[in-house]
Image (cartoon, helix red, strand yellow):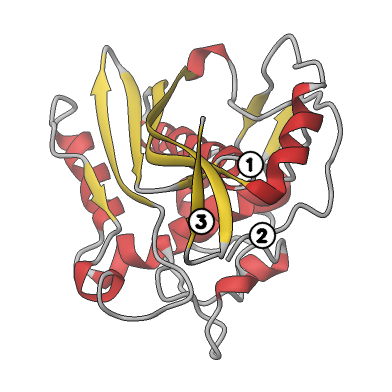
Amino acid sequence: MQKQELNARTNTNVYALPHVLYTHDMRNGFPLLSLRKISKAFVAEALWFITGDKSLDFLQRYTKIWDGFKEGDNTVTSAYGYRLRYHFSVDQIETVLDKLKADSSTRHGVLHIWSPLEDLTVPQKNVPCPYTAVMNIIDGRLNLSVIARSTDMVLGFPTDVATWALLQTIFAQELDVEVGIFSFFSAHAHIYEPHVEVVETMLAQTSALSLPTIGIPKDTYQMAYEKDSGLFDAINVHGYNPSMAITGIPIMK
């Protein structure tokens, strides 16, 4: 992995690779990292996306992971769910699900988060890392491909994978199909220099022999949209045996 001299935004050296692709068959289990414990915050994040909120009020009931990117009014300008449901004057999630229900062979299941007007020109505390996703159904299974412009491989990648894989699971249930292939492509996959020790600690652990599974209640998609207060606790990961939790990992903002 090539060392870059300096990332100007964070004033931190990074080790980076271009064009990194992770692919996983969801039939083999839920892709939750076992070399360190991943908290259930990814569940709250997935549900927050479905609500379409840019306010952090819902998410903060369960986690503070986005608090470092909030504006003075407790909103996130680039909130993914808001971008998908409201920002572009079309509810992309609902529209894509309707298209797939009407025609399972459609190849128009594109979800887009990046907004050139804001993300290229307006200073803000956060711009989307995963910026587009594509859903399709092949052989009766829902596949999801996520594309990211940039990925923090220590903090961001494990949570991004779990969050989007849960969304895939929820959407598959809504479409009454099985889950298929999950893929995550990053144009710039990097490890910040302050995270190198964490990586070394993780690599010294033994990975779990089998992946966990995840259980979601009936009508999870609708329950999430309606902000059902009991839904977070009703979504459970089974058979998750991570090595250990690693605390104090710095967030590079």
Work out whether mark 2 precedes mark 1 in sequence or the reverse, and give the earlier one.
1
Kindly report the distance in space between the C-alpha atoms of the residues bearing marks 3 and 2: 17 Å
Q: Are marks 2 and 1 in contact (CB under 8 Å)?
A: no
Kindly report the distance in space between the C-alpha atoms of the residues bearing marks 2 and 1: 10 Å
For label 3, the residue is 6
What kind of residue is marked 1?
Val
Check the image and report above or below for 68 versus 104: below
Number of the front mark, 3 or 2: 3
For label 2, the residue is 251
Q: Secondary structure at mark 2?
A: loop
Disc number for residue 154: 1
- Coordinates of residue 163 in the picture (x, y in percent): 54, 43
- Coordinates of residue 223 in the picture (x, y in percent): 52, 54
Residue in front for this viewpoint, 173 or 44? 44
What kind of residue is marked 3?
Leu
Kindly report the distance in space between the C-alpha atoms of the residues bearing marks 3 and 1: 18 Å
- Coordinates of residue 123 in the picture (x, y in percent): 37, 80
Q: Extreme front residue here?
A: 5
Check the image and report above or below for 60 versus 5: below
Number of the front mark, 3 or 1: 3
Q: Quadrant of residue 179?
A: top left
Q: Is residue 173 left or right of residue 105?
A: right
Q: Secondary structure at mark 1?
A: loop
Q: Residues within 10 Å of mark 3 (few under 14, many from 20)?
A: some
Q: Is residue 130 left or right of residue 26?
A: left
Disc number for residue 253: none
Q: Are marks 3 and 2 in contact (CB under 8 Å)?
A: no
Q: Which residue: 40% across, 38% down?
A: 171
- Coordinates of residue 124 in the picture (x, y in percent): 42, 78
Q: Is residue 10 left or right of residue 199?
A: left
Q: Quadrant of residue 69?
A: bottom right
